[in-house]
Image (cartoon, rainbow, N blue to C red):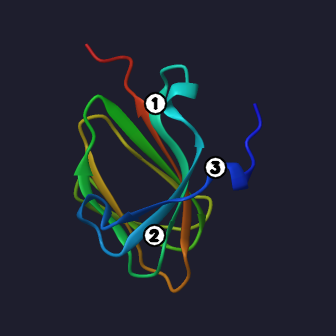
Amino acid sequence: MVRTAKEMGVNHYENMRGGKLAVDAAKFLEAEESYGAGSFFGRAVIPPGGSIGYHQHTGEYEIYYILEGTAKVVDDGEERILCPGDMMQCRDGSSHSIENVGDKELVFLAMVLYNHNQQ
């Protein structure tokens, strides 16, 4: 399968999870194409001052991989600054947020994967 950027399109989310401003996201893989691996596989863009609000994952976990910009993430209450090449994983049962604290767009890959090891 091949999907071009034009074919993916972009979804616009205002105040995502109670965050500030908007997030634009292009899904590079649809959930039904992931063989049950997860629910979201995309490239997200947050403008300066924008964020995805603090939220919890249950039965799944999320990974962010920073491509461009500067992010402040909060992972279970612990704040960290991430730059290109950095990643964070919000584990199953944990909570997190991400905010663009730089002066350029924050661009990152986001993947929400199912926890198949739940007891």
- Disc sitting over residue 14 in the figure: none
For marks 2 and 1, the one nearer the N-term is 1
Counting residues from the start of the chain, the first of labels 3 and 1 encountered is: 3
Label placed on residue 38: 1
Q: What residue type is labelled 3?
A: Met
Q: Could you give the CA–CA distance between mark 2 and mark 1, rounded to whole angstroms? A: 24 Å
Inspect the image, locate mark 2, and give the three-letter code of the amino acid beneath it: Ala
User: How dense is the environment of label 1, judged by Cα within 10 Å: few (below 14), some, or many (20 and up)?
Assistant: many
- Residues under labels 2 and 3: Cα distance? 25 Å
- Out of 32 and 62, give the one closest to the viewer: 32
Left or right: 92 as drawn, with respect to 23 = left
Depth check, front residue: 47 or 62: 47
Measuring 64% from the left and 49% from the top, which residue is drawn there?
8
Q: Which residue has dot 2 on it?
A: 71
| SS at badge 1 | strand
Which of discs 2 and 1 lies nearer the camera? The answer is 1
